[in-house]
Image (cartoon, rainbow, N blue to C red):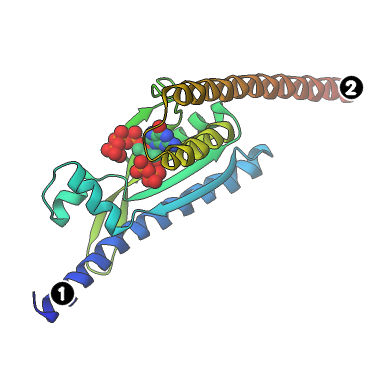
Amino acid sequence: LSIAQLKQFKNEITRFMMMYKFALDELETKVEILQEEFHFLHDYNPIEHTKSRLKTPESILKKLYRKGIPFSFASIRSHIKDIAGLRITCSFISDIYRISEMLVNQGDLKLVEVKDYIQNPKPNGYRSLHLIVEVPVFMSDRKENVCVEVQIRTIAMDFWASLEHKIYYKYNQAVPARLLAELKEAADSASALDIKMERLHREIEEIKEDRAGENVEELRQ
Ligand code: 0O2
């Protein structure tokens, strides 16, 4: 390869990655708007925090190699859907589905794939709702529909997944069976905590509604 060809290739990679960054920026703005409006309307914030990340070119190439897919920008686009990733951490399980519905109901987003690891947890106990959405990105000379992976989870699911990720890599991907069983147990405990917190949240909401009803009654009398 000549220097000029290398420069051109580098530019192509930069432009390719920019497209994913713009898609992520757009999706993050959409989530911020939903969050602000929801807070205004319901005086309640269902989102604890969000985190976005772009896969590095190295990790894209590794995944391509692992899947046995020959290199081209077109094959990367069609086979690797998680180059851009947005993780949304919610307060309660019901918020996950609420946020997911609000996002997929936006006319300009196209839902490409749903993996519900809450209804169907992975054998190791991993839970989260994964969506692949296509985001339209308008650039100077063209429009591109770009895939973004959205992972929506509760704080407890996020806590477990973050630590499991660390332990997994610490043991260099060969975790002893006893630890795997304990990790699964920990995931089930996190899930039980989520269910309990959801029930408490509902009960408190019901009490609040009843009190509001009583106050209206008192005002009427
Ligand atoms: P990172 O560093 O978070 O980006 P594929 O994407 O094709 O390899 P698959 O099965 O199609 O695999 O993807 P899936 O299951 O929808 O989700 C992949 C991503 O979900 C992972 O991305 C993790 O972020 C998360 N994830 C899935 N399973 C687990 C798990 O068992 N433990 C933890 N901690 N996270 C999980 P990456 O690219 O692996 O990592």
Residue at 42% x, 53% y is 53
How many other residues sit within 10 Å of disc 2, few (<14), some (14-19) or many (≥20)?
few
Q: Is residue 103 above or below residue 185?
A: below
149 or 189: nearer the eye? 189
Q: Quadrant of residue 118?
A: top left
Q: Where does label 1 land, which residue? A: 6
Would residue 111 be seen by someone viewing this image from the given angle? no
Left or right, 42 with respect to 108, comes to right
Q: Amino acid at mark 2?
A: Glu
How many other residues sit within 10 Å of disc 1, few (<14), some (14-19) or many (≥20)?
few
Measured as percent of width and height from the top left, residue 59 is found at 29, 53
Residue at 40% x, 20% y is 120
Q: Amino acid at mark 1?
A: Leu
Ligand 1 image position (quadrant): top left
219 or 211: nearer the eye? 211
Q: Quadrant of residue 112?
A: top left
Left or right, 141 with respect to 104, comes to left
Left or right, 82 with respect to 152, comes to left
Residue at 74% x, 23% y is 204
Q: Quadrant of the C terminus?
A: top right
Q: Is mark 1 within 8 Å of ligand 1?
A: no
Measured as percent of width and height from the top left, residue 145 is found at 26, 51
Measured as percent of width and height from the top left, residue 172 is found at 38, 40
Q: Is residue 117 above or below residue 69?
A: above
Left or right, 184 with respect to 91, comes to left
Q: Is residue 1 above or below residue 56?
A: below
Judge depth for marks 2 and 1 and give the one in front.
1
Q: Quadrant of residue 129?
A: top left
Q: Where does label 2 land, which residue? A: 218
Secondary structure of the residue carrying numbered label 1: helix
The residues tagged by marks 2 and 1 sit, at their Cα atoms, a distance apart of 77 Å
